[in-house]
């Protein structure tokens, strides 16, 4: 029974934090440290697939419209820009994998990235004060969103979705439009990464670990909570800035440093 509760907790942590600008990698690593568990790569892959399914369900009407409305100039333009941002992100991911970049096993790099990310959010939000933010995704935004995702891949704790959204906001895109575009780019990006990781897990003989009741439970928990988190965030950004997330990141970064000093995490 304890293993099922652990799976639920990890699934909820992953689901809530995957699309909020707070770093799901950091939260998941911290949760595993505090629970005293080290899940298999197959388990971690599966709970990361849950949020992908969730965000696809939230945006399924838009996804269908984009895939079937190529004759519409507006939809075609958006699809081309999404494809371009995905391509840039995929190429960067391919290079990072070839260079052997791995996620950290300690929380120190995550604490540093968490605090740095808070500073960036404060700076961008202050920079946008009084500016009229637009709804049109420009080519600089396309590149910036891809760059934000690349940055998060290199520096875990940055937050993939957070970096992409803040980059788009920095270039003048409104918060709702930035969130929507970043999340739509994230669908093929995360599906591709998830499919590759599942393929590697199967190739490593971990098929059975992908299908354990605990892994399935964590997947379900991550999917449900991510769905709720995405819906909440889409409503939140209609009338709020990202400043509360910056304060949260500061609190989390300080807490991580205190936990490391106390020897509770490494």
Image (spheres, rainbow, N blue to C red):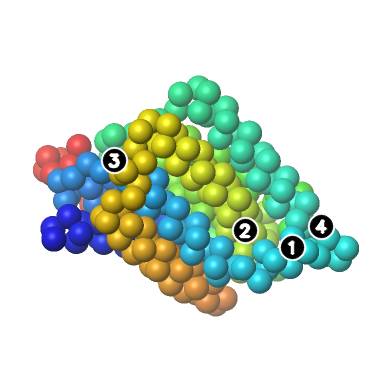
Question: Camera-side residue: 248 or 27?
Answer: 27
**Earlier along the polypeptide chain: callout 4 or callout 1?**
1
Q: Secondary structure at mark 1?
A: helix
**Earlier along the polypeptide chain: callout 3 or callout 4?**
3
Q: Secondary structure at mark 3?
A: loop
Quick check: can you spot residue 125? yes
Q: Nearer the viewer, mark 2 or mark 3?
A: 3
Question: Camera-side residue: 207 or 45?
Answer: 207
Q: Find disc 2 in the rendering and name its residue.
A: 184
Left or right: 257 with respect to 154? left
**Earlier along the polypeptide chain: callout 2 or callout 4?**
4
Q: Nearer the viewer, mark 3 or mark 4?
A: 3
- Pinpoint residue 239: horizontal percent, then vertical percent: 55, 77
Q: Which mark is residue 40?
A: 3
Quick check: can you spot residue 151? no
**CB atoms of marks 2 and 3 within 8 Å:** no
Q: Residues within 10 Å of mark 3 (few under 14, many from 20)?
A: few
- Pinpoint residue 78: horizontal percent, then vertical percent: 76, 58
**CB atoms of marks 3 and 4 within 8 Å:** no
Q: How far apart are the alpha carbons under marks 2 and 3?
A: 29 Å
Q: Find disc 1 in the rendering and name its residue.
A: 66
- Pinpoint residue 240: horizontal percent, then vertical percent: 51, 73
Q: Residues within 10 Å of mark 2 (few under 14, many from 20)?
A: many
Q: Secondary structure at mark 4?
A: helix
Q: Find disc 4 in the rendering and name its residue.
A: 77
**CB atoms of marks 2 and 1 within 8 Å:** yes
Q: Secondary structure at mark 2?
A: helix
At a point 47% along the width and 38% down the height, the residue shown is: 199
At a point 28% along the width and 51% down the height, the residue shown is: 212
At a point 55% along the width and 70% down the height, the residue shown is: 58
**CB atoms of marks 3 and 1 within 8 Å:** no
The answer to whether 222 is drawn above or below residue 89 in the figure is: below
């Amino acid at each position: 029974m304890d293993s099922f509760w652990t799976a639920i907790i990890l699934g909820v942590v992953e689901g809530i934090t995957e699309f909020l600008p707070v770093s799901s990698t950091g939260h998941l690593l911290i949760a595993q440290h505090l629970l005293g568990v080290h899940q298999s790569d197959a388990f971690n892959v599966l709970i990361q697939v849950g949020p992908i399914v969730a965000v696809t369900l939230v945006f399924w009407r838009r996804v269908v419209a984009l895939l079937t409305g190529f004759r519409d100039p507006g939809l075609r333009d958006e699809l081309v820009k999404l494809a371009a941002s995905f391509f840039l992100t995929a190429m960067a991911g391919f290079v990072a994998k070839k260079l052997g970049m791995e996620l950290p096993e300690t929380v120190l790099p995550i604490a540093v990235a968490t605090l740095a990310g808070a500073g960036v959010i404060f700076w961008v939000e202050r920079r946008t004060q009084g500016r009229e933010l637009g709804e049109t995704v420009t080519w600089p935004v396309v590149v910036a969103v891809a760059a934000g995702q690349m940055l998060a891949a290199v520096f875990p704790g940055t937050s993939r979705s957070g970096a992409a959204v803040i980059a788009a906001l920095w270039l003048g895109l409104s918060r709702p439009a930035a969130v929507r575009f970043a999340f739509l780019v994230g669908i093929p990006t995360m599906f591709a990464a998830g499919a590759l990781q599942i393929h590697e897990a199967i190739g490593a003989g971990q098929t059975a670990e992908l299908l354990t009741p605990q892994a399935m439970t964590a997947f379900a928990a991550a999917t449900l909570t991510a769905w709720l988190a995405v819906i909440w965030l889409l409503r939140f950004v209609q009338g709020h800035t990202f400043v509360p997330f910056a304060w949260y990141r500061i609190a989390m970064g300080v807490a991580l440093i205190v936990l490391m000093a106390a020897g509770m995490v490494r």
